[in-house]
Amino acid sequence: MSNRQIAETLKVDDKTVGNVRAKLETTAEIPQLKSSKGKDGKVRTTKRKRSSVFATDKAQAQKAFDALVRISVIVGRRFG
Protein backbone atom coordinates (compact mmCIF):
# COMPACT_ATOMS: atom_id res chain seq x y z
CA MET A 1 0.00 0.00 0.00
CA SER A 2 1.45 3.36 -0.99
CA ASN A 3 2.08 6.26 1.38
CA ARG A 4 -0.51 8.30 -0.51
CA GLN A 5 -3.18 5.60 -0.12
CA ILE A 6 -2.51 5.31 3.61
CA ALA A 7 -2.49 9.11 3.99
CA GLU A 8 -5.78 9.44 2.11
CA THR A 9 -7.41 6.79 4.29
CA LEU A 10 -6.13 8.36 7.52
CA LYS A 11 -6.66 11.96 6.40
CA VAL A 12 -3.01 12.83 7.02
CA ASP A 13 -0.18 14.07 4.81
CA ASP A 14 1.64 11.47 2.68
CA LYS A 15 4.99 12.90 3.78
CA THR A 16 4.07 12.17 7.40
CA VAL A 17 3.23 8.58 6.49
CA GLY A 18 6.51 8.26 4.60
CA ASN A 19 8.54 9.61 7.49
CA VAL A 20 6.84 7.34 10.02
CA ARG A 21 7.25 4.36 7.69
CA ALA A 22 10.96 5.16 7.26
CA LYS A 23 11.44 5.33 11.02
CA LEU A 24 9.65 2.01 11.56
CA GLU A 25 11.72 0.38 8.82
CA THR A 26 15.03 1.61 10.25
CA THR A 27 14.15 0.20 13.67
CA ALA A 28 12.94 -3.08 12.08
CA GLU A 29 9.44 -2.64 13.52
CA ILE A 30 8.04 -3.21 10.01
CA PRO A 31 9.71 -4.93 7.05
CA GLN A 32 11.52 -2.83 4.46
CA LEU A 33 9.51 -2.87 1.29
CA LYS A 34 11.24 -3.24 -2.06
CA SER A 35 8.12 -2.25 -3.97
CA SER A 36 4.75 -0.65 -3.42
CA LYS A 37 1.46 -1.03 -5.29
CA GLY A 38 -0.22 2.26 -6.12
CA LYS A 39 -3.89 3.10 -6.42
CA ASP A 40 -3.62 2.52 -10.17
CA GLY A 41 -2.49 -1.06 -9.53
CA LYS A 42 1.05 -0.53 -10.81
CA VAL A 43 3.92 -1.87 -8.74
CA ARG A 44 6.80 0.56 -8.25
CA THR A 45 10.14 0.06 -6.58
CA THR A 46 10.62 2.06 -3.43
CA LYS A 47 13.45 4.52 -3.25
CA ARG A 48 15.80 4.16 -0.33
CA LYS A 49 16.75 7.47 1.18
CA ARG A 50 17.54 8.60 4.65
CA SER A 51 14.74 10.40 6.31
CA SER A 52 14.06 11.93 9.66
CA VAL A 53 10.66 11.85 11.27
CA PHE A 54 9.05 15.27 11.14
CA ALA A 55 5.48 16.23 11.73
CA THR A 56 4.00 19.59 12.52
CA ASP A 57 1.03 18.02 14.29
CA LYS A 58 1.72 15.40 16.99
CA ALA A 59 -1.79 13.96 16.78
CA GLN A 60 -1.43 13.48 13.02
CA ALA A 61 1.97 11.83 13.43
CA GLN A 62 0.65 9.51 16.15
CA LYS A 63 -2.34 8.56 14.00
CA ALA A 64 -0.06 7.70 11.07
CA PHE A 65 2.32 5.80 13.33
CA ASP A 66 -0.52 3.73 14.84
CA ALA A 67 -1.87 2.92 11.39
CA LEU A 68 1.52 1.78 10.14
CA VAL A 69 1.92 -0.45 13.18
CA ARG A 70 -1.46 -2.04 12.41
CA ILE A 71 -0.41 -2.48 8.78
CA SER A 72 2.86 -4.10 9.85
CA VAL A 73 0.86 -6.66 11.85
CA ILE A 74 -1.30 -7.45 8.81
CA VAL A 75 1.74 -7.72 6.53
CA GLY A 76 3.46 -9.94 9.07
CA ARG A 77 0.47 -12.28 9.11
CA ARG A 78 0.38 -12.53 5.31
CA PHE A 79 4.09 -12.81 4.60
CA GLY A 80 5.62 -13.78 7.93
Image (cartoon, rainbow, N blue to C red):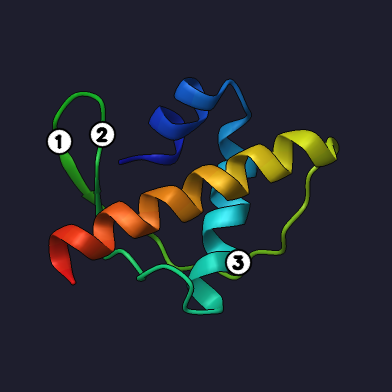
User: What amino acid type is highlighted by mark number 1?
Assistant: Lys
Label 1, secondary structure: give it.
Answer: loop
Question: What residue is shown at x 85% (from left), y 38% (from top)?
Answer: 56
Image position of 33 (left or right of 80):
right
Question: What residue is shown at x 62% (from left), y 54% (from top)?
Answer: 19
Q: In the picture, residue 80 is in which quadrant? A: bottom left
Mark 1 surroundings: few (<14), some (14-19) or many (≥20) residues within 10 A: few
Residue farthest bottom in this picture:
27
Q: Which of 25 and 74 is in front in this view?
A: 74
Are circles 2 and 3 on residues that touch, CB within 8 Å? no
Labelled disc at residue 55: none
Question: What residue is shown at x 60% (from left), y 66% (from top)?
Answer: 23
Mark 2 and mark 3 lie on one chain; the one further toward the N terminus is: 3
Label 2, secondary structure: give it.
Answer: loop
User: What amino acid type is highlighted by mark number 2?
Assistant: Gly
Q: Is residue 56 visible?
A: yes
Residue 1, how many percent across, how many down?
30, 41
Q: How far apart are marks 2 and 3 (CA)?
A: 21 Å
User: What amino acid type is highlighted by mark number 3?
Assistant: Lys
Residue 65, how many percent across, how many down?
60, 49
Check disc 1 and report the residue beneath it: 42
